[in-house]
Image (cartoon, rainbow, N blue to C red):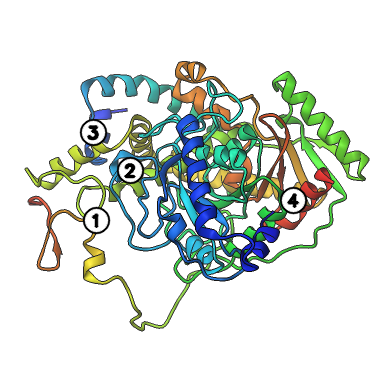
């Protein structure tokens, strides 16, 4: 596993020590995951949930939701009704 | 029992402010020795509960369930200062009936663990021996349920066994319901297709009563389904041969003694072969980690949770917030989960695991045609000492879940019955057959 690449796409900085430690541990775990290869899953449908789940529809009517004060209660940086973020591009 | 307590509250025999002053003092005393709580509700004695089936009943809540106005960290540093502005549906339903929250219980960060040791806060200690683990991930819930000498029910949560495991280690009853019958709205997710909110209690009667209050469809969680109870008939139970090999000797003896007790009370048993027990564990971890890695993507240091001074570009900022906020096990699972979903690997891991889940469900369903319930010990080991846990590799840690992941992957309900100190009998049922499980519990205790 290219841990550098995976940590970049997961937006998770890792220390050099963590990279080294995880590489070994993750290799063991991925080896163990190979156990699933021996199960024949030809023509088997995947179960994304354990029970049958149907799409749920509702009327598109506005209902009471959180007010602005509540929405921003846990955000340190916000301005004029927007969350603030560092530069994206 | 709750019923008697509620009557006493309604009749004015018990005065709630005085009662709660004592309860909170007791919680603090227990917490100082066992670290069951991440947050204790200091305002419990000021609460004015509604009148209902649970008027004034103390409930503890696993920290990953959102409680309005009470800090909810899910055991993670990244949510250290997070105070929800809304209640999870299970909380609203319990408050509607008059329940009062006493505190938020300790857990592994986001549920990532089997011993509650992957926690950003203090590690909960076993009620019978403080050198040992409470189990996990709902360790604090198990501990306070055992040690509370007042009426109490704990709300807990399971992804791969996180309710049964600590219930067994702490010697209490627990129910992990059929996937989808209890709303997950307001649950700080671990893995959406596996997470189930359930309960712990010191007796079956209270467990059943509170269970019936929290189940049922919720418009805030489109994956919920209505609970369709079955008749509580239990004639024959099955024991998977694969679940009773290589057990700790004490557990083996307690287990077969419990089976003999059930047999004397008229329940027949039979051993049988259950397929895919070895493969269920890696399939479970692949699904759980893949889903966890997407769920944790929302912690980027903007709307809530850990936030740093806004510097650099977004990529650097979010990566740094996450580096500082997540613990080791969360990081491990993000990396593994991201990897198994990557182009080129998705079919090999994630999709394959989802197909194995279909086979596991079909396998269990086949046996439920013959048996009213499937039973095994809940855990293959006794609560380990903290010193022993330190020596385990991550993979060895995962392997402790061997008996609980099967029913969790298949979304099957399961009940823990305490049968000896820190040893539980695991009773697994078909979807929606909670009534049969409660029946086994009642028969065992009768």
User: Which residue has dot 1 on it?
Assistant: A74
Using the image as rendered, state which of residue A62 and residue B139 is in the foreground: B139
Residue wearing tag 3: A5
Q: Is residue B327 above or below residue B26?
A: above
* Secondary structure of the residue carrying numbered label 2: loop
Mark 2 vs mark 3: in front: 3
Q: Nearer the viewer, mark 1 or mark 3?
A: 1
Q: Position of residue B341 (x, y in %)?
A: 37, 43
Of circles 3 and 4, which is in front? 4
- Closer to the camera: disc 2 or disc 4? 4
Up-down relation of residue B100 to residue B366 (above or below): below
Q: Is residue B400 visible?
A: yes
| Same chain? Circles 2 and 4 | yes
Q: Residue tagged by mark 4?
A: B437
Spatial CA distance of label 2 from label 3 is 13 Å
Chain of the residue under the numbered disc 4 shown in the image: B
Q: Are marks 2 and 4 in contact (CB under 8 Å)?
A: no
Label 1 residue SS: loop
In the image, what residue occupies the spot 82% across and 43% down?
A: B444
Nearer the observer: mark 1 or 4; the answer is: 1
Horizontal placement of B132 versus B441: left or right? left
- Going from N to C along the chain, the mark reached first, 1 or 3, is 3
The span from disc 1 to disc 4 (Cα, nearest Å) is: 42 Å
């Amino acid at each position: 596993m290219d841990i550098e690449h995976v940590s970049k796409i997961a937006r998770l900085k890792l220390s050099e020590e963590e990279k080294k430690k995880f590489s070994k541990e993750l290799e063991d775990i991925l080896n163990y995951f190979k156990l699933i290869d021996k199960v024949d899953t030809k023509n088997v449908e995947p179960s994304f949930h354990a029970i049958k789940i149907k799409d749920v529809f509702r009327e598109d009517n506005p209902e009471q939701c959180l007010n602005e004060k509540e929405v921003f209660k846990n955000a340190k940086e916000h301005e004029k009704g927007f969350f603030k973020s560092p530069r994206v591009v | 029992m709750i019923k008697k307590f509620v009557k006493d509250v309604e009749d004015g025999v018990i005065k709630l402010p005085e009662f709660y002053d004592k309860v909170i003092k007791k919680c603090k005393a227990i917490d100082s020795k066992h670290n069951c709580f991440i947050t204790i509700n200091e305002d419990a004695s000021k609460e004015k509960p509604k009148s209902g089936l649970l008027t004034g009943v103390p409930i503890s809540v696993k920290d990953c369930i959102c409680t309005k106005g009470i800090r909810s960290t899910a055991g993670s540093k990244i949510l250290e200062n997070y105070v929800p502005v809304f209640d999870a549906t299970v909380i609203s339903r319990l408050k509607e009936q008059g329940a009062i929250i006493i505190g938020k219980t300790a857990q592994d960060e986001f549920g990532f663990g089997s011993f509650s040791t992957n926690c950003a806060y203090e590690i909960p200690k076993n009620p019978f021996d403080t050198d040992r683990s409470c189990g996990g991930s709902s360790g604090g819930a198990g501990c306070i349920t055992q040690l509370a000498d007042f009426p109490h029910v704990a709300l807990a949560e399971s992804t791969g066994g996180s309710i049964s495991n600590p219930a067994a280690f702490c010697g209490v009853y627990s129910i992990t319901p059929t996937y989808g019958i209890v709303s997950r709205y307001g649950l700080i997710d671990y893995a959406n297709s596996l997470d189930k909110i359930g309960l712990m209690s010191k007796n079956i009667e209270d467990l059943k009563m509170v269970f019936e209050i929290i189940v049922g469809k919720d418009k805030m969680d489109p994956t919920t389904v209505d609970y369709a109870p079955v008749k509580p008939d239990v004639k024959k139970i099955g024991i998977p041969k694969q679940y009773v090999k290589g057990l700790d000797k004490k557990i083996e003896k307690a287990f077969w003694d419990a089976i003999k007790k059930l047999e004397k009370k008229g329940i027949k048993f039979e051993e049988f072969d259950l397929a895919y027990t070895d493969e269920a564990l890696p399939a479970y971890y692949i699904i759980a980690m893949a889903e966890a890695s997407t769920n944790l993507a929302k912690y980027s240091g903007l709307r809530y949770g850990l936030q740093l001074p806004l510097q650099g570009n977004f990529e650097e900022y979010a990566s740094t917030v996450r580096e500082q906020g997540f613990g080791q096990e969360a990081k491990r699972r993000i990396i593994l989960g991201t990897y198994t979903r990557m182009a080129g690997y998705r079919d090999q891991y994630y999709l394959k695991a989802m197909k194995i889940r279909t086979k596991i469900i079909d396998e269990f369903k086949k046996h439920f045609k013959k048996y009213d319930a499937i039973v095994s010990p809940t855990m293959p080991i006794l609560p380990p000492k903290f010193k022993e846990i330190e020596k385990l590799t991550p993979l060895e840690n995962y392997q402790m879940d061997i008996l609980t992941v099967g029913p969790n992957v298949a979304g099957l309900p399961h009940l823990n019955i305490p049968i000896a100190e820190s040893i539980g009998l695991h009773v697994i049922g078909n979807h929606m057959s909670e009534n049969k499980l409660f029946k086994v519990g009642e028969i065992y205790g009768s």
